[in-house]
Image: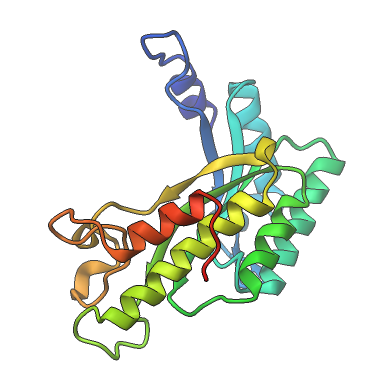
Amino acid sequence: VKTTVSHFAEEKDSNGNSIVASWDVMNEYFDGGSIRNSIFRQKMGDDYIKKIFQWAREANSNVKLFYNDYNIAGETNKRAQIINMVNDFVSNNVPIDGLGMQMHLNHNWPTNDLPTSIQDIADTGLLVHVSELDVKVNYGNDITELTTTRAQAQSDQYQNAAYYYQSIVPTSQQFGITIWGARDRDSWLYSGRTEWPLLFDNNFDPKPAYDGFTEGLKGNAVN
């Protein structure tokens, strides 16, 4: 941890700034509401996560340190475990700057829990990063092409994610939104060629999802 973080702390851009603004120090510590039984946990115990955040901070006092996980929106028990963990970090001076919500969504999931989850994470007072946003349209494998109806549902979900982020998270806590790929064929979900989760089609033409996402960023809710 220290070797990696300190190495990139020394790498600067043309303006003299570090080329790395943040690290996902830990990714997916939880599996559902339980701690993942990783090799690190087996060898170092449950508190290894605190150690690596401390080591990262010792290696670079300026870079932002994040915890990142999936289904923070959609799994209330898992979200509660994560919030309890980071609150414990803050209470015990374990360095952490923000939380990454992966946001691998479906066109119809989650619904009511999406704004609730963003509010819960913002309430920690930490930076909020939508870190791996994409929206599946064929989770049930029930379509063979991207239909107009499904494309609009995807657009609405992208718009919801952007709108709720902009409207709920205080500006001072908004670290950013990262789309998990550019065009559909480059997505991690594309292997079966029956999923179209991103903002651009295979020819880099914008899909309805692009328009929905930009409308959400402008602060416009889904009608």
- Residue 141 lies in quadrant: bottom left
Residue 178, can we see it? yes
Q: Residue furthest bottom?
A: 142
- Residue 136 lies in quadrant: bottom left
Residue visible at 39% across and 67% down in the picture: 155
Residue 97, can we see it? no
Residue visible at 77% across and 49% down in the picture: 124
Residue visible at 31% across and 58% down in the picture: 199
Left or right of 154 in this view: 75? right
Residue visible at 65% across and 73% down in the picture: 113
- Residues 146 and 179: in front is 146
Instruction: State the image coordinates of residue 144 (x, y, percent, origin top left).
Output: 19, 86
Q: Is residue 158 above or below residue 32?
A: above
Instruction: State the image coordinates of residue 76 (x, y, percent, origin top left).
Output: 69, 73
Instruction: State the image coordinates of residue 97 (x, y, percent, origin top left).
Output: 67, 37
Q: Is residue 51 above or below residue 194?
A: above
